[in-house]
Image (cartoon, grey):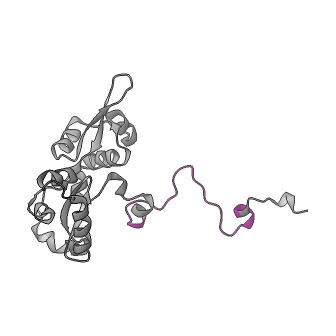
Amino acid sequence: MVEAILFASAEPVTLQELADRMPHGADPAEALAYLRKRYEGRGVQVVKVGDAWAFRTAPDLGFLMQKETVEHRKLSRAAIETLAIVAYHQPVTRAEIEEIRGVAVSRGTVDQLLELEWIRFGRRRMTPGRPVTYVVTQEFLNHFCLESARDLPGLKELRAAGLLDNRPLPGSTTPADDDPDETTGQSDMFEE
């Protein structure tokens, strides 16, 4: 029954939604664990997307689906930067986004991300003015096949993929590899 519900659903289905559709006493969590093992190593997999479950094409076969994807208009650089800031710093206010980007965020940029349903309004901050915060949505997680925002790539992964410079971060220093005094923290004045 869980397999049929997941297969027929266009959107990921939560554990509660599965439980509501099943007979009393049925355990959808147990069925999901069974299905994950059953589909492991196959062309489709049962994956957790946020707090919901769905069938997805196995990552190594994703190239087969490229012909069937719909080409949407591309996001502007400002929208991509804003989305990245929300994803990595959520919950974040407009003022915080502007501070990180170094420029003002236009209303249209935020509206576009809200319209795509990749970000949504979060809770208001308990600070003067009670600014609204932004967080990523289930749709964002679903689009990028993430269980949660914690699954976003870190600095090391982004550098390894060539998406970031390999320069050290400002303020960080690395000791010289060939100077033993630098690596041990000892100085010449103690060697008499």
Q: Tell me the quarter of the image containing the C terminus.
A: bottom right
Residue 141 within the magenta-colored segment of the rendering: no
Rendering coords of residue 91 (x, y %): 34, 40
Q: In this view, does 118 lie to the left or right of 123?
A: left
Which range is magenta? 160-183
Q: What residue appears at the point 32 percent right and 49 percent down from the top-left corner?
A: 84
Question: Residue reaching furthest left?
Answer: 8
Query: Is residue 30 depicted above or below 90 in this figure?
Result: below
Query: Is residue 78 depicted above or below 177 in this figure?
Result: above
Task: Give the quarter of the image for residue 70.
Answer: bottom left
Q: Is residue 39 left or right of residue 157?
A: left
Residue 171 within the magenta-colored segment of the rendering: yes
Rendering coords of residue 35 (x, y %): 22, 69
Q: Is residue 77 left or right of residue 74?
A: right
Q: Which of 12 and 125 is in front in this view?
A: 12
Q: Which of 6 and 131 is in front in this view?
A: 6
Q: Nearer the viewer, residue 12 or 70?
A: 12
Q: Please identify the dominant SS of the magenta region.
A: loop
